[in-house]
Each structure stands twice: as structure tokens, then as C-alpha cells.
Image (spheres, rainbow, N blue to C red):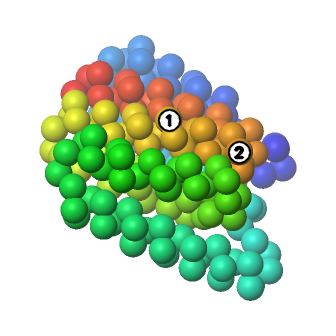
Amino acid sequence: MGENNVNLDEIKELLQELKENDGNQLKYEEVEAEIVEQKNTIRSYLMPDNQQEDERLKQIASKIEAHIQTGFEAFNQVDEIINYLEPVFQRGKIDKVYGRAVVLIEENTLIEQVKNHFDNPATDYQLLDYVLSRAIELSNEVMPSEYTEILKLEKAFFEEVYNHS
């Protein structure tokens, strides 16, 4: 996948530096920015070229986003949110178009929302770990292996971040 400028080794090196530097804030930001950039690189070439397919995917993503927002507004406990989100990930495994909408369009937004949802690092990490674990499972079904690898690196990154908070 070198033609798409995806560089997993760079993320791995940055993550290793982060671990060795014991939680430097600037390094956190650099690693996270690189992860997001690499995911966006893959996303950009996976988005449908056909306008009709693109619109359909975005319509599905819009419904998923509304569903996710409802869960965050309606529930105050991490277990309640997890139970509410689980069908989204399960449906994505069965309905591949739905799964691609979850991963291609909604996954980054969901991660951003989860990072500080409870204003409690331990609880936020519990929810973030769940979301990333399910995104990895779903990515195995509907995305190229490089994307799944980036998600695994992102999960390791957040484990490092929350271990130092």
C-alpha cells in the first residue's frame, strides 16, 4: 500500500519514542496527528468514486451519527453506552455497507467524542478501549489490513496516554 503513502513504521517509531520519553505532551500530539493522518490517507482512497454510492454511504453515516448521539445524550454510565453502541458494531459486521459507513465516516468522530466524555480518565479509557476494540473487529471485516493495523496502533497509543494520566 506504499502507493497510498501509508506509513505504519513511522507510527510504530513515534509510539516507541512516546513510551521511551514517558509521556511527553508534544509527543502525544505528534503521534495522534500521525495516526489520524494515516487513517485519512486510507479513507480518501476508499471513499466511493461513484457519486450515488458516496451519497448513500454518507446518508447511512448520518443515521449512525444520530443514533450514536442519542446514546451519549440518553445514558450516563459507561456500561449503558456500551450496551447501546454494541448493535451498531454488530450490524456493521452483517451489513458491509453499514460497516464501511461506521469505519470510514463515523469512527474518528466517535473516538474524539469518547476521549473526554466522562471527564474521568479511567472511565473514558474504558469506553475508548471498547470503541477501538469493536472498530478493530469491524475493520477486520470491511477494511484493508493496513487500516486495521493503524487502529491497533491507535489502541496502543491511547493505552499509553491513559496509563500516564
For badge 1, the amino acid type reads: Ser
In the rendered view, does 2 fall on the left or right side of 82? Answer: right
For badge 2, the amino acid type reads: Glu
Q: Residues within 10 Å of mark 2 (few under 14, many from 20)?
A: some
**Quadrant hosting residue 49:** bottom right
Q: Residues within 10 Å of mark 1 (few under 14, many from 20)?
A: some
* Observer-nearest of 11 and 115: 115
Q: List the residue tagged with mark 2.
A: 141
Looking at the image, residue 142 lies above or below residue 151: below
Looking at the image, residue 110 lies above or below residue 61: above
Q: CA distance from mark 2 to mark 1?
A: 13 Å
In the rendered view, does 118 fall on the left or right side of 138? Answer: left
Residue 34 seen in the figure:
no
Quadrant of the image containing the N terminus: top right
Residue at x 47% of width, y 21% of height: 17
Residue 50 seen in the figure:
yes
Residue at x 50% of width, y 35% of height: 133
Q: Position of residue 50 (x, y in %)?
A: 80, 80
Labels 2 and 1 touching (C-beta < 8 A): no
Please report whichever mark, 2 or 1, sits nearer to the chain's N-terminal start: 1
* Observer-nearest of 118 and 67: 67
Looking at the image, residue 159 lies above or below residue 48: above
Query: Quick one: SS at disc 2?
Result: helix
